[in-house]
Amino acid sequence: MVGLMRFAVIFIAAVLLMIIFSIFYRGFPALSWEMISQSPKGGFYYGKGGGVLNAIIGSMYLAVGATLLAMAIGLPVALYMNVFIRRRQRLVHAIRFFLDLLWGVPSIVYGAFGFSIMILLGMRTSLLAGIITVALFILPIMIRAIDEVLQGVSKGLYEASLSLGSTRTQTAYKVFIRQALPGIVTAVLLSFGRAIGDAAAVLFTTGYTDHIPTSLNQPAATLPLAIFFQLSSPIKEVQDRAYAAAVILTIIVLIISITARILSRRFEKHRIKF
């Protein structure tokens, strides 16, 4: 069994390295300052000048908005499960079961659901519609990730807080959040990485444009869709630019992962040591 586990680890690491190598091998030569600093110009999709600045900024707008919206809903839900109804185990297990089901739903289903709601409300493709759809997509992920962290908070710490006269709300926001802060930061940043890298959920809701959005009611381009559209081109220069956009997206996700590690270690000092 130890040998099997080692083989599985080596296999996964090899696949990851192959993916990264193939992306950087084709994308890094096509990467330039023009790609990062400019929006698409006339003839961009035929191999001429311009870049993917619109997709970079659109992805950041989308991911930041969706993450903030999901955190505003997900953190109170996770605290409610672990502080206010922690003794009602059947209800808590039922909530976790449904969250796990929602976690397993493909992102394209969320995109189709968001598109149906847009048709019902008479909305057009926009940054706001994409933010709401992606927030719904990452919400179960964020809640379950924070929930797992909060479950690690000591029961004795919970009882000690209540015995000193604290209310459950004070216990939730002053004790549980402080104790689980490193894990909460990691969960939020990982959800952000999932939001910025998804294409299916925004395919029907966010739309696509060569311009940088200036309001929530305008469509927005994203890096995953930019990669998808450019790879569909028969022109080699455009395909190479798709790999260059994939390099940019990979670097952003890598920075997010490293930031999550650094912040988790930095916030570790705020935990109550036993």
Image (tube, rainbow, N blue to C red):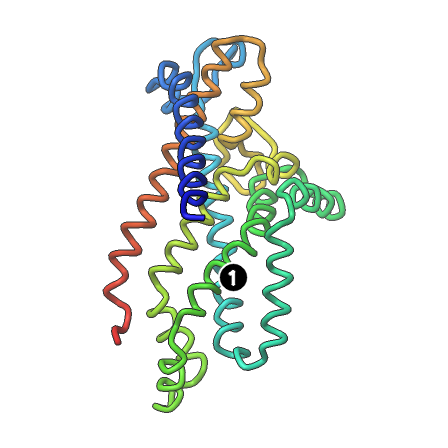
Question: Front-most of 255 and 122?
Answer: 255
Vertical side of 40 occupied by 101: above or below? below
Q: Residues within 10 Å of mark 1 (few under 14, many from 20)?
A: many
- At a point 57% along the width and 35% down the height, the residue shown is 199
Give percent across and percent down for residue 105.
65, 48
Residue 23 lies in quadrant: top left
Q: Whole-percent x and y of residue 51?
A: 43, 20
Image x and y of residue 76, in percent: 50, 68
Task: Look at label 1 and name its amino acid.
Answer: Gly
Q: Is residue 31 left or right of residue 62?
A: left
For label 1, the residue is 74
Please report the residue visible at 25 percent of the width from the left and 73 percent of the height from the top: 273
Q: What kind of element bears circle 1?
A: helix
Q: In the image shown, does 208 or 242 lie closer to the viewer?
A: 242
Q: Quadrant of residue 167?
A: bottom left
**Quadrant the C terminus occupies:** bottom left
Residue 60 lies, with reference to residue 117, above or below; the image says: above
Position of residue 156 in the picture relative to residue 235 (left or right): left
